[in-house]
Image: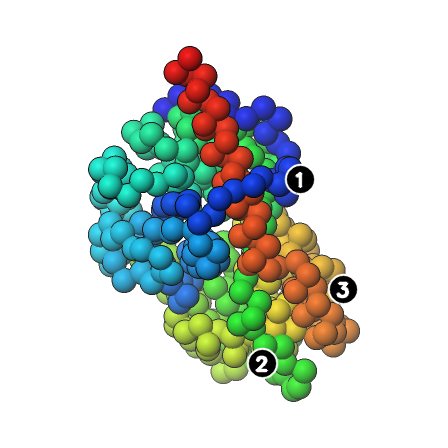
Amino acid sequence: MRLHHIYTGSHVPSEAREPFNLEKASMKVLYIAYPLLTVSEESAGGAEQMLWTLEGEMASRGVATTVAASAGSQVAGKLFVTGEPCSQPDDFDRRNHEHQDRIVAFINSGVNGFDLVHDQSGSFWLRAAAINLPVLATLHLPRHFYPAQYFAGVSENVSFNCVSQSQAQSFSDLENMLGVVPNGILLERFRPNFGARSGLLWLGRICEEKGAHLALDIAARAEMPITVAGQVYPFSYHQQYFEREIAPRRQRMPNARFISSPLPEDKRKLLREAKAVLIPALADETSSLVAMEAAASGTPVIAFRRGALPEVVKEGVTGFLVDGMEEAVAALSRIDQISTAACVQHARKNFSSARMAERYLNLYGHVLQEYKIKGKKMSA
C-alpha cells in the first residue's frame, strides 16, 4: 500500500463539487459489504442498511450493480457470494481474509468489466493495490475505531468519503478524502403517526457504545415503559455486554421488553407508535439512520450531543440533544413540544435516499474522471 494523492483540494465536500455528467446506463459498480453479516432490508447495522438502500437506488437508475457479500444477502442487482455469514464469535480475521481473497480473484477474472468498486466493508481498500480499478471507500466509523496503519501507505487508486461533517473533521489529514455524502433513507416506507403514542424505544445494534443500557436507565428514572429492539452481533464482547448490562435490567424492570432482530415492518411500527426514541450513544456516532427513521415517522428523538447526532437531530424540531442521563430524563417532560408534522417535513427535506444516490453518482463521476486522467499520465 502506497500513499498517493488522487485529488488536490480534496477536502471540499462532495455536494459542493461541480455536477458531473455520468452515463449511468453503461456503468458497472461492485459494492463490497462487511464480511460477517448479510445485506438486506432486515440488516441491523447502519452500514449494511445504507449499502442496501444505495445499491437499490443505483439499480433503479440503470446502473449495473453487483454486491459482494455473505450468502443469504438480498440485493437489487447481482449478488456475488463470498462465503457464509459469521456464526461463531470472533471469527472476523478468517472470514475477512476469505471475503477479500474471493473479491480480488472475482475482479481480476475480468469477466464482469466493472468500472468502479465502492467499498463499504471497512477494510477492503487495504487490498486495492491488487486490482486495476478505482476504489471509493466510504468510512462509516469514527476515526479511532480504525487501526492507524489502515491509512498509512494507501494505494493510489483509493479515494475516501465520509458520511457527516463531524466525522470528516477527524479525517482532514487524508488528502485522498473527497468529502461528505450524508446517508439517506427510503422515506416512502415510513408512515407518520398523528394519533396516540406510548412508551419509549431504543432501536439498533446491541453493543455498549450504542447505550441500550442507558436507555433502560433513563426509562426507569422517568418511570416510563420502554422497548429495546435490536440484534446482538456474533462478537463475544457484544454477547457479554448483553448478559452483563441488558439482561439484569430487564429482570428489574417490569415495563421493559426486548425484541430480538425485529423485521422491517415491525421496526417501522415500533417507530411510529413510540412517544420518543432514545439514542444515548457513548461513541461519536458518524450518522444515525434510527434518528432519520424516527423523524420520518413523526417521532421525537432524545439523543446525546455527540458526533454527528447534532447534524441529524434538529434541536427543538425533531427532538432534543442532551448532555447525559439527567438531561435526557428532563427532556422527556418536554417531548410533547415536538410536532409530528415538523419532524416529517424535516425528514423529507433532508434524509432522502434519492438525494444520497445522486450525490454518490456525482462522486463516482469524479473518481472515474480522475482515474482516467491519472492512467493517461502514467502511460505518457
Q: Amino acid at mark 3?
A: Gly
The answer to whether 58 appears left or right of 302 in the picture is left
What amino acid does circle 1 point to? Answer: Ala
**Residue 342, horizontal then vertical, whole percent:** 74, 70
Looking at the image, which residue is at 52% across and 38% down?
365
Q: Give the label, 3 or 1, closer to the camera.
A: 1
User: Quadrant location of residue 317?
Assistant: bottom right
* Residue holding disc 1: 16
Asked whether the beta carbons under mark 1 and mark 2 sit within 8 Å of each other, the answer is no
Other residues around mark 3 within 10 Å, as few (<14) / some (14–19) / many (≥20): some
Left or right, residue 345 beside residue 88: right
Pointers 3 and 1 in contact (C-beta within 8 Å): no
Q: Is residue 146 left or right of residue 93?
A: right
Residue shown at 39% from the left, 39% from the top: 115
SS category of the residue bearing label 3: loop
Assign a secondary structure to mark 1.
Answer: helix
**C-alpha distance separating marks 1 and 2:** 38 Å
Judging depth in this view, the residue of 350 and 211 nearest the camera is: 350
Residue shown at 56% from the left, 41% from the top: 21
Mark 3 vs 1, N-terminal side: 1
Q: Disc 2 versus disc 3: distance between alpha carbons?
A: 20 Å
- What is the number of the mark on residue 316? 3
Q: Residues within 10 Å of mark 2 (few under 14, many from 20)?
A: many
Residue topped by disc 2: 273
